[in-house]
Image (tube, rainbow, N blue to C red):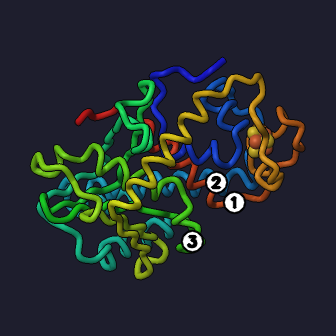
Amino acid sequence: MTLPDSFHFTQSSLQDYLDCPRRFQLRYVLDQPWPAVESEPLIERERLADLGRRFHQMAQRHTVGLPVEQIAASAQDADLVRWWWNYLNVPPRDLPSAVRRAEVTLTAPLYLPPAQRGGPRGGHRLTAKYDLLALDPGRRAVIVDWKTERKRPTRAQLAARMQTSVYRYVLVEAGTALNGGHPIEPEQVTMVYWFAAFPAEPEVFPYDSAQHADDAAFLSGLVEEIAARTEAEWLKTDDTKRCHYCTYRSLCDRGTTAGIGDETDVELDLDIELEKVEEIAY
Ligand code: SF4
């Protein structure tokens, strides 16, 4: 069973593939239900995911102009109250103000690397759902991603995440309609990770044409590799530590005991859930 041409790749699915091809196959190709508790304690994991979800909703409501008091009335949990205070009082600085769009989804076709460029690749598309896009059309385009992890990732960890590549790449490829009808140049793009628990320590990633070309080559090559897989059982990761947090471990004969919760994993699952929205075409 192979991937349909109509499959929309996302940063989460590509991250899954890089972490473990077998996990991608089980989750996206075979649509395998999760057979095991992913990590313990489950209640705390669910609480973190729920708080993250609610924080994203509050930020979205704020962006569309709902009164602050009305939004805050729904926040009772101490963590959520603190995050909301941080959001209002220590927000990302110097954001463009002309256009603000929350929870917007963009989709771009994937192209071959420049040397082989000739058009969309096999119908495969790459979708990104943005927490917030802030633009001054023709000048700047800032991607803001809200993060609710309790432990702040390092810059190197964030740079290595597929999200950093995919979000900047897709905005350049598919953001024209948000930019007054003008193509967005890579040099106009910045991505900001803002941490609800560490609001004064955002991580900022600029972008440029060279990085965009590298991303185009890497992403299209990766998708080409995934689409070409035909074996019955895709490669399992050598990093067996990942298996402790993976719901499929009983299917892979990689143990039955759940690992103690890893927040990176919670964030990835939250990203997957938040990505499940109706696509808006541009
Ligand atoms: S249990 Fe391990 S090998 Fe199996 S899908 Fe999960 S990460 Fe991959």
Residue kind at label 3, given as amino acid type: Ala
Residue drawn at the location 89% of the way across and 44% of the way down: 255
Residue under numbered circle 1:
262
Q: Which residue is nearer to you in this view: 279 or 78?
A: 279
Q: Position of residue 174 (x, y in %)?
A: 27, 43
State the residue lying farthest toward the front: 115
Task: Name the quarter where the N terminus is drawn.
Answer: top right
Q: Position of residue 92 (x, y in %)?
A: 32, 73
Estimate the spatial distance between the alpha carbons at disc 1 and disc 3, rounded to whole Å. Answer: 18 Å
Evaluate if marks 2 and 3 touch, with contact meaning CB atoms under 8 Å apart.
no
In the rendered image, the residue lying farthest to the bottom is 200
Image quarter for residue 152? bottom right
Q: What residue is shown with label 3?
A: 156
Say if mark 1 contacts mark 3, CB within 8 Å. no
Measured from the top left, where is residue 74 in percent x and y? 37, 56
Nearer the N terminus, badge 2 or badge 3?
3
Give how far across and how far down residue 235 sits, in percent: 77, 37
Horizontal side, residue 50 vs residue 239: left or right: left
> Callout 1 environment at 10 Å: few (<14), some (14 to 19), or many (20+)?
some
Callout 2, which amino acid? Asp
Which residue appears at 63% of the width and 42% of the height? 17
Sooner in the amino-acid sequence: mark 1 or mark 3: 3
Q: Disc 2 marks which residue?
A: 265
Q: Quadrant of residue 93?
A: bottom left
Element marked by disc 3: helix
**Residue, x 44% and y 80% (percent of image)?**
201
Q: Amino acid at mark 1?
A: Asp
Dot 2: what SS?
Answer: helix
Instruction: Classify the position of ligand 1 by quadrant: top left, top right, bottom left or bottom right.
Output: top right
